[in-house]
């Protein structure tokens, strides 16, 4: 990282080199992205010198700013999607019909294709589609990989069903309470609002007056 002898292509020989913060603009898919990052310089001609580790870091920093600007998933988010389904990198690649290297690259910071980003979001948000992929491409997975994925899918379904169940139960309680109260007195909007808010609070739900 620090001062060391390195090959300088401008001097065409080994020179002492130093590392300094340097501003550089990359054009990523047509968008200029400027980053300030550690860069290796020749101490004799003061030109920048190739340094694989630093140059990679700089490029990944530019990718990360581009991702934020365009709204692409980060490598951590991509990894989290795979872990959500208890899948290895090779298993998720097989399900999506990608090469295993593609997924490894995305998780280690390479910039994903926009179409792949959309597929990853669908993979994250739509367990039913993942189940379809398992039916279609499951024969490419090992038995262990299949079992792990099925376990993850089943526990997701249970969680969704139990959330849906409690929402329906809460709605029904509110309906019954309104029905009973309306049999004795005409209801005011205020009374209804207060009651719904109270029941939501009891269920641990924070209601908002802004529409979703
Ligand atoms: Zn030089």
Image (tube, grey):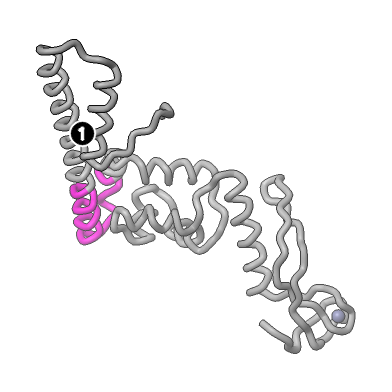
9, 61: nearer the viewer: 61
Residue 139 among those drawn in magenta: yes
| Magenta-tinted stretch | 134-155
210, 40: nearer the viewer: 210
Q: Which residue is mark 1?
A: 167
192, 105: nearer the viewer: 192
| Percent coordinates x, y for residue 129 in the rendering | 31, 39
| Residue 71, quarter of picture | top right
Residue 22 among those drawn in magenta: no
Name the quadrant of the C terminus. top left
- The residue located at (70%, 76%) in the rendering is 51
Ligand 1 visible in quadrant: bottom right
Q: Is residue 47 above or below residue 122?
A: below
Q: Is residue 44 left or right of residue 129?
A: right
| Residue 132, quarter of picture | top left
Q: Is residue 14 above or below residue 199?
A: below
* Circle 1 Cα neighbour tier, 10 Å, few/some/many (<14 / 14–19 / ≥20): some
Q: Is residue 147 above or below residue 159?
A: below
Dominant secondary structure, magenta: helix
- The residue located at (62%, 46%) in the rendering is 69
- The residue located at (37%, 46%) in the rendering is 124
| Percent coordinates x, y for residue 130 in the rendering | 30, 44
Query: What element does badge 1 sit on?
Result: helix
Q: Is residue 177 above or below residue 201?
A: above
- The residue located at (73%, 87%) in the rendering is 3
Q: Is mark 1 within 8 Å of ligand 1?
A: no
Name the quadrant of the N terminus. bottom right
| Percent coordinates x, y for residue 202 in the rendering | 21, 39
Q: Is residue 105 left or right of residue 183?
A: right
């Amino acid at each position: 990282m620090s001062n060391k002898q390195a090959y300088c292509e401008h001097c065409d020989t080994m020179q002492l080199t130093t590392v300094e913060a340097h501003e550089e603009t990359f054009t990523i898919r047509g968008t200029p992205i400027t980053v300030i990052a550690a860069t290796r310089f020749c101490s004799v001609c003061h030109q920048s010198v190739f340094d694989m580790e630093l140059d990679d870091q700089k490029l990944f920093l530019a990718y990360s700013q581009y991702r934020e600007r365009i709204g692409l998933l980060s490598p951590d988010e991509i990894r989290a999607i795979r872990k959500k389904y208890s899948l290895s990198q090779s298993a998720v690649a097989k399900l999506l019909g990608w090469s295993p290297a593609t997924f490894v690259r995305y998780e280690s910071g390479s910039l994903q294709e926009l179409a792949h980003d959309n597929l990853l979001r669908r993979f994250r948000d739509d367990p039913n589609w993942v189940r379809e992929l398992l039916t279609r491409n499951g024969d490419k997975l090992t038995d262990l990989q299949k079992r792990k994925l099925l376990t993850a899918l089943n526990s997701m379904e249970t969680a969704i069903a139990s959330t849906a169940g409690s929402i329906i139960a809460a709605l029904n309680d509110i309906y019954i309470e309104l029905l009973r109260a309306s049999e004795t007195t005409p209801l005011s909007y205020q009374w209804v609002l207060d009651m719904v808010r109270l029941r939501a609070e009891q269920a641990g739900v924070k209601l908002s007056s802004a529409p979703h």
